[in-house]
Image (cartoon, rainbow, N blue to C red):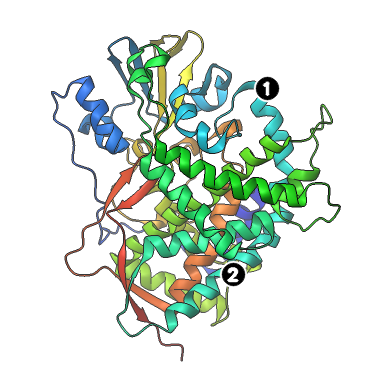
Amino acid sequence: MVTAAFRQAIAAKAKALGIPTKAPKRKSAFRSTLPKHPPRAITPFRALHLARANVISVWRPEAYFSPFLAEKYLFRWMYVANNPDAVRHVMVTNVGNYWKSGAMQKALKPLVGNGSFVSNGEIWARQRRINIPAFHHTRIKLFTQYMAEEAARLVDIWADKPPDAEVAVDAEMANVTARVVCRSMFSEDLGERGRPVFQAFTEYQEALRQIDYAEMLGLPRWLSQRPSAKQRAACKVIDDVVYALIDERSGGQDDRGDFLSTLLSARDEETGTGLSREELRDEMSVIFLAGHETTANTLCWALYLLSQDAEVQARLVDEIETVLAGRAPGHDDLKDLVYTNAVVNETLRLYPPVPVFSRQVLGRDEIDGIAIEPGSNMIVSPWLIHRHRLIWDRPNQFIPDRFLPGQSRNRSKYAHIPFGAGPRTCIGAAFGEYETMIILVSIIQRFKLTLPEGVKVTPQARLSLRPSPGLPMKLEPRSRG
């Protein structure tokens, strides 16, 4: 996760620059779009059907101001921890009672095996211990060079396009983040070898149905759907490439400074054991999924939000010009980009990369005076928490000032959880935030992006939160004089 030292550096730079820490009472020029609310009289079966197509489309209006929700789906209860104290209870205080759900494991197991994204208990604890050195801040600092180089490559390609050229920003962000994560994992972008892997990850998610009827209704596990032929084919493509790369590097003594080198040499400090070939494959798939898909979507949403608010974009451009004076961004610039950091965090609030975290309840519990039944499903939804009317002022408006230093003084840290919370907070959060900032700054330095007339973008969530049906945008080069 992003270190406290980095946050303190941001706050110190804001103070030095005289950036106000009190957000002005300003109405945003943009109000975030929401999926259409379901009917109030919706049946549980209809709700599950809606959630299968778009997880966040199931929430009724009261979900945005209720502190806790509970509903029974045939044989199984589903609870929603919908206030910061309840989130802390589930994800921190009593985290051992809430494991990654069977539905999440089933949805992702073909893709990431028993990797740290879906594992539980001692298996997960061992994986976390082994993975920590790979995400040490000194390693991440090295990777920011890859981020800057790939961002520069992207904007140079765009610069050769004709005026008012239209680009598919969703595809462009997927490509640039895929190159960054491949270089960070393997010290190379894989070129033609990597393209089938990128496409396979996309195809797997397009075929994914995160909501499992049998799981949600409490029916026997054998009634659950098997992975589709499309999902199995995508996994075969990924396995062929990732296993080949692992085999090429196994037994070698050279440390290339990438994720694979670190994981090949890592040993569990408690047992002295390392990762098996299969475990390496699983962890590399987790890193690719988390470091590529989520960052690409955050960049899409940031560019979309900026295109809808000229004042925020002008303030961002002004900071970039002041701090960088025309040069490309690097790691040491990040602490000085105070407003940029606020823009990214407000984007993560409005459009959290993973909008729903699902947990399985192991033992009986109580939250807010409500009895929690063993075997039920517990939901923590960043989408709901981040837009909760009792937690946030003007929750559907784009107001980056919320995240200027000093603004969170009276706000629970469990009110903003784009990367989760507690011991299972995303280990790659710092990697994702740095990558988002460097690529975003590189783009805004050189281009103004606008949404074509008549294009409507809505959020769609399966595993991650994507702009639907895509994000076409027009490029307008900025003057570099």
Crowd class of label 1 (few under 14; some 14 to 19; many from 20; radius 10 Å): few
* Frontmost residue, 129 versus 366: 129
Which residue in the structure is indicated by mark 1? 122
Q: Residue at x 73, y 37 (%)?
A: 130
7, above or below 176, in the image: above
Q: Quadrant of the N terminus?
A: top right
268, above or below 370, in the image: below
Q: Residue 171 lies in what quarter of the image? A: bottom left
- Residue 353 numbered mark, or none: none
Asked if residue 59 can be seen in this view, the reply is no
Q: Earlier in the sequence, mark 2 or mark 1?
A: 1
- SS at mark 1? helix
In the displayed structure image, the side of residue 272 where residue 194 appears, left or right: left
Q: Residue at x 82, y 32 (%)?
A: 269
12, above or below 68, in the image: below
In the displayed structure image, the side of residue 147 where residue 295 appears, left or right: left
Which residue in the structure is indicated by mark 2? 148
Q: Residue furthest bottom?
A: 481
Q: Residue furthest right?
A: 253
Crowd class of label 2 (few under 14; some 14 to 19; many from 20; radius 10 Å): many
